[in-house]
Structures are given as structure tokens and as C-alpha cells.
Amino acid sequence: MAVTIKDVAKLADVSTATVSRVINSDPRISAATRDRVLGVIEKLNYKVNSIARSLKSNRTCTVGFLTPEIANEFFMTVAQGVENSLRERGYNLIICNSNESPDEEVERLELLIEKCVDGVIIAPSTGSGEHLRFLEQVGLPTVLVDRLADGFTSDAVLVDNATGTYKAIHHLLKRGHTNFGFIGGDVSLTPFRERYEGFLRALSEFGIHPDEAHVKFGNYHVDSGYAMMKELAELTPPPASVFISNYFMHIGATQYLVENRARLPRTIFVASFDDMALSAVAGVPSLTIAQPVLQIGRRAAEMLLERIDSRASGTAPPPRIERLPTRLVFHDRNSKAQP
């Protein structure tokens, strides 16, 4: 069985964070502790050659990307943007999947630390960041994408979720849409919370309060969108327009509408956050909010490399949160795309 960072920490009688600090030449580690840990590393033959190289240059030119869903088109497009930017600087990317589990997230991050990555980009699995705080102790440069994590402070790149949703709903309200339904995800996650806030803000400006029966919350998967659209469509009467918080729930909701189109009393207008590959092929009137997905990844990589460089020079700035703009895309054949 391969020797792990936990094996080194146990034999050296230190924490895994301390082992990581030694590997990363953290000046806060005392000479005695450093010597003891390096002695155990040599004794256990724990990645000796890799560590020797990293201790000389203090760089492996490798970055980790941790996603909650590796099969998710959105996160893989973000990863493509990350890799495009890293490649320009001679860096390599390791992609890991947390399966939406904080425990697995920690396991994958420990693995990436064992691989001596120079930094990590994370799309957090939950809205809480307590389990990520060990990264601060290790001193590993970190950038969050798409979501923030309460209790954990780092650089982050998101889109302006609230404003994007507000503009879409405001656009529809100005064109006479008033009877809205809402399909949302877990509001403990930044995007879904902010999109719901933008939805409510637009309605409030027109003096509209959504019917509680028209507001549904589930997860962010296809089956959830299908089930919640079914609930809305079977109301008497159903909402005339429905805003959906992400691409996958949009696909599920559209699947229900297409399968049941013949028996629905009227067409339901659909608006959704995310404009992805299948957004335009459903055959129902649709307005989507496009995110600059590749740019999210590219900017996250740029911020991480800036953080790595500033750490090496001892001039690290305070953490920053950047929000990129969205744009409206119209898929109804009678409408034109607008910025």
C-alpha cells in the first residue's frame, strides 16, 4: 500500500498540515520539526524524488481543480477555461470530483496536497466552508469558482447572479408577464440564493408578490426540474411563466413540458439561468441568461497564478471576489438575441 501524508504525519507526531508546510517550505516551521518530518519522509520513501524537486524550486507547476460533479457540462467548461489559461504559463491541471460531498472534498484536497500542487481552484460542494479552513493553515493558494463558502476566505470568481436574474425578469415584466412560477435549487449555495433574490427584487419593483404555491425548491438536477415543473403545470391555473435557476433543471422542466404538451391547457413561457448546448433545441419559447463560462475558468486561473506569484514574493494582497456580467439570450423565433 502506498505511503500517504497521514502516515508521515503519524510517525512524525505532527498534523498533516504541518507535513504540508514542510513540503511547501513554509518558513513558520521550526528547523527541528522540519528535520523530523523530512527524516520520516525519507524513512518511508514518501515521494522522495517529487519532494526533492519541489523543495528546490518551491513549484511543481501543477494546479488542482475540484468540482462537485465531473460529468457536469458547466463545471467541465470552467475547467477548460482554467486549463487554457494555465497552459499559457506552462502549468498542468489535475481534475478531481467531490461527488457533492464535503468529506470527499477534503479527501481529494489532501490528495492534491500530497501531489504538491501549487494551488487549487474549487467549486465548493456546500455553502459552508468550515471543512476547507485547513487550506488556510496549510497556506495553499486557493480560488473559489461559481460559489462562495461561509467561514472560508479566499479569492473567488462568480457571475452577477442577482443582477442577471433581475434583468431577465424585469424584461419579461415590461412585456406583460406577471403570473410567475419559480424553480430553484438549494439556497444555501450562492448561485441559487442570489438568483432567487434577483427574481424577488424584479417582482417587487412591479408590486408583485409571488404565490407561495408557485415557488418550488429542489436540487439542481434534471429530475428535480422535471418533478417541480410537473407540480407547477398541474396547478389550477398554472403560472403563465416559469423562471428556472439552472440549466439542468431547465432541461428536466422542458422534458416534462414536451412530453405533456398536448394535454397542457396553455403554453408556459420558460426563462432560465444558463445558456448551454441544448438550451435552444427544446422547441418551447425560452429566454436564457448566458454566463461567460470559459472566462470564469480563465479568470480563476489568472487570479490563482497571481496569488502563487505574490506568495512567493511575500506581497500577497487581500482576497478578492470578482463577479463577471451575464447577458440575455432569446430562443423564441420571434425574438432577437440581446446583450
Image: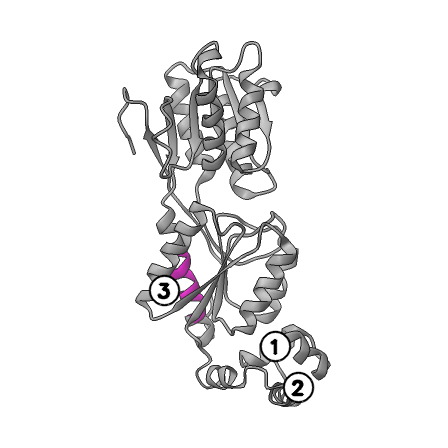
Task: Tell me where the magenta segment starts and ends, as one range.
Answer: 298-308
* Residue 144 in picture, x, y percent from top left: 50, 55
Of the residues tagged 3 and 1, which is closer to the observer? 1
Residue ID at (41%, 73%): 61
* Residue 250 in picture, x, y percent from top left: 46, 31
Q: Quadrant of residue 136?
A: bottom right
* Residue 330 in picture, x, y percent from top left: 32, 28
Q: For marks 3 and 1, give the CA distance.
A: 29 Å
**Badge 3: how crowded within 10 Å, few (<14), some, or many (20+)?**
many
Which residue is under mark 3? 86
**Badge 1: how crowded within 10 Å, few (<14), some, or many (20+)?**
few
Which residue is under mark 1? 2
Which of pointers 3 and 1 lies earlier in the amino acid sequence? 1
Which residue is under mark 2? 33
**Badge 2: how crowded within 10 Å, few (<14), some, or many (20+)?**
some
Which amino acid type is shown beneath numbered disc 2? Thr
Q: Quadrant of residue 306?
A: bottom left
Which amino acid type is shown beneath numbered disc 3? Leu
Q: Is 267 part of what is drawn in magenta?
A: no
If the image is split into quadrants, where does the C terminus sit? top left
Residue 292 versus residue 136: which sits nearer the camera? 292
